[in-house]
Image (cartoon, rainbow, N blue to C red):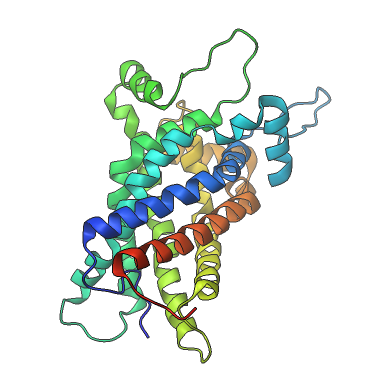
Amino acid sequence: MAADLNPKSDISFIEIFLCSAFAACFAELCTIPLDIAKVRLQLQRKASTGDGGSIPKYKGLLGTVATIANEEGLAALWKGITAGLHRQFIYGGLRIGLYEPVKTYLVGGDFVGNIPLYQKIFAALLTGAIAITVANPTDLVKVRLQAEGKLPAGVPGRYAGALNAYLTIMKQEGIGALWTGLGPNIARNAIINAAELASYDQVKQTILQIPGFMDNAFTHILAALGAGLFAVCVGSPIDVVKSRMMGDSSYKSTLECFIKTLKNEGIFAFYKGFLPNFSRLGSWNVIMFLTLEQVKRIFTREIYND
């Protein structure tokens, strides 16, 4: 049994785009506190104790969440949610909505049977790159808003909100600044998209070939967890560079950011926030794919015996 993300040919691109955008936005809304913890851990620099040592402000996923909530309030855990929803609507809708058409185009409309894994990976690389090129400004604003911690009393934040951030960045840095970090962002999102979509597609296909397994929620959870783990393993170094470039405009290039991070903090700096990243991306994938599968059934009116 095939495991295509879009199993019926009569569902249109607009319908799958809307299904994907809704599922991605819902997952973002549920998991953005974990994403904020991940960004803060990735941007964290060593804090001096005065005696030559250093104590990091944020420690671990739950510790980071607790610190942010305690110092900045619960609302701070949803900083950047507006830009995050902007990003997921555009990026999530395009990367998944284009996946099946691109995959079909690559193998040809007359292809019969299971599509080879390398074709799935190539299709996901292309759709991830296309989608994030369009959505990069939303990603930049989201990271800028998330990176800003609690400010002293009377000191205003850099941005009053997502819309103000777009306008301020264009005014102060130029419209091209909205595509800051596009290089690592394309690399990161193309790779992670390939890891997520191709691995979900492949794992689900493999599971459905095992006797006793059906196309139900349990299968979707297993496939989504596998996709999330694989995505974090291959995408974490690029994700760290992307977050640092977007959160700190002092970096002039991707290479400079990579070299400075490696020189000053070592190779393990590229896996900062790995556990919160997997916690976030794993749960994000589970929520997104479960929601996507269910919403698509509304459009396709398919009945499953779950």
| Nearer to us in this view, 105 or 205 | 205
| Nearer to us in this view, 243 or 237 | 243
Kindly tell me whether residue 295 is visible in this rendering. Answer: yes
Taking the spot 32% from the left edge, 52% from the top edge, the residue there is 93
- Decide: is 254 above or below 271: above
Image position, residue 27 (x, y; %): 49, 51
- Decide: is 218 above or below 51: below
Taking the spot 36% from the left edge, 76% from the top edge, the residue there is 117
Kindly tell me whether residue 59 is visible in this rendering. Answer: no
Image position, residue 198 (x, y; %): 39, 69
Count the numbered circles shown: 0
> Which residue, as the protein is rendered here, is positioned at the far bottom?
211
> Which residue, as the protein is rendered here, is positioned at the far top?
154
The quarter holding residue 266 reads: top right
Image position, residue 220 (x, y; %): 49, 71
Taking the spot 46% from the left edge, 41% from the top edge, the residue there is 242
Image quadrant containing the N terminus:
bottom left
Horizontal arrangement in the rendering, residue 274 relative to residue 114 (left or right):
right
Horizontal arrangement in the rendering, residue 273 relative to residue 246 (left or right):
right
Horizontal arrangement in the rendering, residue 43 relative to residue 255 (left or right):
right
Taking the spot 51% from the left edge, 36% from the top edge, the residue there is 244
| Nearer to us in this view, 69 or 43 | 69
Image position, residue 70 (x, y; %): 73, 29
